[in-house]
Image (spheres, helix red, strand yellow):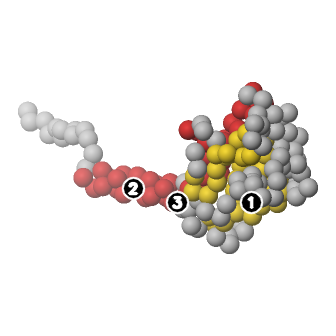
Amino acid sequence: MIVNRRTAHSGFTLIEILVVLIIVGLLASLAVFSMGGNSQQRELESHVRELYLLMQTASEQAVLNNLELGLLLEDDGYQFVAFQDETGEWKPSGERLFHQRTWPEWLSLTQFVESDAPRLTSSEDKLRPTLVFFSSGETTPFEIEFTIGNDSDLVHTLASDGVSPLEWRQPGSGDEEW
């Protein structure tokens, strides 16, 4: 007696494997494109985050060490300065953390700083900080907007009313009114 049995092969065909690989590839490419922004947007956020953290640190250092620290904002970068009580002048901060930094050429910043706030300096002082972090915990009231060139759709804002903690408003955060 001859029994005609079909042997069952388990596994996948080459066509099935190729279809799965194509679907996985399409999903991976879709994920890469939707992960948000181009490299300039990520770099802008990185620069703003770095300045935000440095400003928070400077504010804390001013209180802890009972000294006045300043932030000198320039078109091409920024640096932190310290007020010298003995000479009554601002000098570059000696701490490695507060070394001078530069902006990328495409970064645009707009400053709104309260002009009548105390600055602890005279008009002829070479290093006149834009913002001062006082040993009392207060700060010069300010608002700084960072954008890529003239793109007003993507605005990161660092701000403080002088008494409240430093605030970082990111694009799309919904806190456009201050």
Going by the image, does 16 lie left or right of 1? right
Q: Nearer the viewer, mark 2 or mark 1?
A: 1
Question: Tag 2's secondary structure?
Answer: helix
- Residue that label 2 marks: 25
Counting from the top left corner in percent of width and height, residue 109 is at 70, 63
- Residue farthest left in this picture: 1
First-in-chain label (2 vs 3): 2
Q: Which image quarter: residue 77?
A: bottom right
Tell me the quadrant of the picture where the N terminus can be found.
top left
Q: What residue do we see at 78% from left, 43% from top?
A: 88
**CA–CA distance in space, label 2 to label 1:** 39 Å
Q: Amino acid at mark 3?
A: Ser
Q: Nearer the viewer, mark 2 or mark 3?
A: 3
User: Which is nearer the eye, 1 or 119?
Assistant: 119
Question: Tag 1's secondary structure?
Answer: strand
Q: What residue do we see at 56% from left, 62% from top?
A: 104
**In this picture, is 170 found above or below 83?**
below
Q: Residue 39, labelled with which disc?
A: 3
**CA–CA distance in space, label 2 to label 3:** 22 Å
Going by the image, does 69 lie left or right of 11? right
User: Which is nearer the eye, 119 or 20?
Assistant: 119
Q: Residue 145, labelled with which disc?
A: 1
**In this picture, is 142 found above or below 165?**
below
Q: Amino acid at mark 2?
A: Gly
User: How many marks on residues?
Assistant: 3
Q: What residue do we see at 74% from left, 46% from top?
A: 89
Q: Are marks 2 and 1 in contact (CB under 8 Å)?
A: no
Counting from the top left corner in percent of width and height, residue 72 is at 70, 53
Q: Amino acid at mark 1?
A: Glu
Rate crowding at label 3 as few (under 14), some (14 to 19) or many (20 or more) other CA atoms within 10 Å.
Answer: few
Q: Nearer the viewer, mark 3 or mark 1?
A: 1
